[in-house]
Image: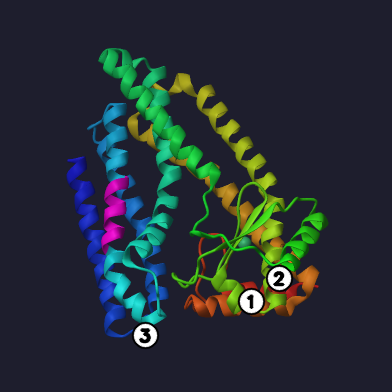
Amino acid sequence: MLWLSLLLTSVGVVALGRAVISATARTPSYLPVGRVARRLRRLLWLSLALKAGAGALMSVLGASLTPPFAALALLGGAGLTLLEFALMFRWLYPHERTQRGLQASLGDYLQGRLRLVWDALAPILAGGLGALTVSYTLSGQYRGWGGLGILTASAMGLSALLIGLGMMRRPTPLPIRWVPVETHLLNEAHRLGRELGVRVQEILVLDGTRLRRANAFALSGGRIAVTDYLLATLTEREVFAVLAHEVAHLAQRRRLVRLWLMQLGAGVGGAVALAPLWERLPRWGLLAWLGLLTLGMTLPLLRARQRHEREADAFAVSQYGKEPLASALRKIAALHQRGADEQGDAVHPSLQNRLRAIERLI
Ligand SMILES: [Zn+2]
């Protein structure tokens, strides 16, 4: 039943995606591919929510799975999601090629796009597999399976650990181009870092030209990455403003990790304290509690990251004034075919709101 509902969800999601993609094929001027890609991202969240809903419904209805089978269902759901989006991006590729003059091969394009899907899936998989491993071992259920139980428990735990480690390392979102960064850029980054008490180790140049992506990222280990496409499009002062924004993110990372650890501690502590109640709770009560826990852990992080975006913009403005950052943001939005009123993602506000906030800065 669960597998059937997961499959049906996939079919529905792919059909929706197909409809959006054919709309851009018919009238590219009305619906440019950049906007289609963002609609597909929303579709990704819908796909995940529907699958989680199907799983929750099945477990309330009593078709409860033992942890190893629940882990399999989790992996199967993730695999289906990747397949759905591989198919949709396969259809989107020729349109993006013509509309945005993409040079990347289909393989590179799919890799770049699916990486973002994986970024959304990885925390769910790591958290889900981790929780299942804990419940499987602590409840002693694995003993009922003999040697196989120990084997499955270790396989589940190891997968959770590996996926978690992969997230921590935060690999660069695009292939690295091993070209040296201009010295004045690195010097400026070091100066900005000193200003905020954080050490900028290096600046990586990523290949954004083939996928037409003008972005900058704050990575782990004091590294900042900018795409060559961004460097080629922006003026020097605009690049500096973007750099300042990312250096601010480097400084915020430590605070973010501390907040995350605190919440993890509170979550685990709450779970342990309430452990005697679990047995007595009805299934839906357990699910509601899990839902609340997830919400309680994600919302404060989301709020913090939204605040960090505003602070990073404010730091850039404090260094170079309003104009370089504002014009950089306008150019980047235009390159990605993003409308002024369109929200970037859960963390980044729309261009128009962001410009308004910059305008209000003193
Ligand atoms: Zn940012």
Q: Which mark is residue 30?
A: 3
Q: Secondary structure at mark 2?
A: helix
Cα separation between marks 1 and 3:
25 Å
- Residue 348 quadrant: bottom right
Residue 84 falls inside the magenta stretch: yes
**Residue at the (69%, 45%) spot, across then down:** 255
**Residue at the (45%, 22%) spot, across then down:** 277
Tag 2 residue: 241
Q: Is residue 311 visible?
A: yes
- The tag earlier along the polypeptide, 2 or 3, is 3
Q: What is the magenta range?
A: 78-87
Q: Are marks 2 and 1 in contact (CB under 8 Å)?
A: yes
Quadrant (top left/top right/bottom left/bottom right) for the N terminus: top left
**Relative height, residue 140 to residue 48 (above, below):** above
Identified by mark 2, the residue type is: Ala
Tag 1 residue: 328
Cα separation between marks 2 and 3:
32 Å
- The tag earlier along the polypeptide, 1 or 3, is 3
Q: Secondary structure at mark 3?
A: loop
